């Protein structure tokens, strides 16, 4: 059983997130997704449109996702990796290099972001007159 983990806010859940989950799940058997709580989002300087429960519900409904856990602080990743017996930690490559320190605990990979879609772009486009 190969277990993969990733973390994020996933506000205005979109196909860029889905394609990340699709590629991560294809690397193993079980995909765990840490969804940032509203409190942690505030620490990240992000204000999500949907609250944690709503974002977690949408991520959990994705067919590539097996388990959803709350992401409450930056330092939980090593504990999660050990406690959940994670083999691969994966993120989009806007995080390239930022989590290499986890390489002592599991394989660390960064996947190409899906072009031309982001929560910020959605919000900007919707706000345009
Ligand atoms: N992503 C992607 N393609 C996009 C948009 C996002 O692959 N077009 C990926 C990002 O690279 C990230 C994940 O989707 O791996 C979630 O992105 P966000 O919801 O923006 O999460 P972020 O603010 O990057 O928080 O501890 C890690 C943080 O919680 C990550």
Image (tube, rainbow, N blue to C red):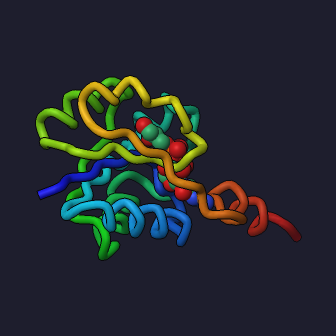
Quarter of the figure that contains the C terminus? bottom right
Residue found at x 74% / y 69%: 126
Image side of residue 117 versus residue 60, left or right: right
Residue 72 on image: x %, y %:
32, 34
Residue at the extreme right: 129
Quarter of the figure that contains the N terminus? bottom left
Asked whether residue 49 appears in the rendered view, the answer is no
Q: Taking 108 as reference, is 121 above or below it? A: below
Image side of residue 12 versus residue 34, left or right: right
Picture quadrant of residue 70: top left
Residue found at x 48% / y 68%: 19
Residue 17 on image: x %, y %:
49, 63
Residue found at x 28% / y 25%: 104
Residue found at x 42% / y 44%: 109
Q: Taking 76 as reference, is 35 above or below it? A: below
Residue 5 on image: x %, y %:
29, 48
């Amino acid at each position: 059983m190969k277990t993969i983990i990733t973390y994020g806010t996933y506000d205005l859940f979109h196909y860029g997130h889905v394609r990340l989950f699709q590629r991560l799940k294809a690397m193993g058997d079980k995909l765990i997704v840490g969804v940032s709580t509203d409190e942690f989002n505030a620490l990240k300087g992000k204000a999500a449109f949907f609250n944690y429960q709503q974002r977690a519900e949408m991520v959990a409904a994705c067919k590539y996702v097996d388990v959803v856990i709350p992401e409450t602080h930056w330092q939980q990743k090593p504990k999660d990796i050990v406690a959940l017996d994670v083999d691969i930690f994966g993120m989009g490559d806007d995080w390239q290099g930022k989590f290499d320190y986890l390489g002592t605990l599991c394989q660390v990979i960064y996947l190409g972001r899906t072009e031309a879609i982001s929560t910020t772009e959605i919000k900007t486009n919707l706000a345009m007159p």
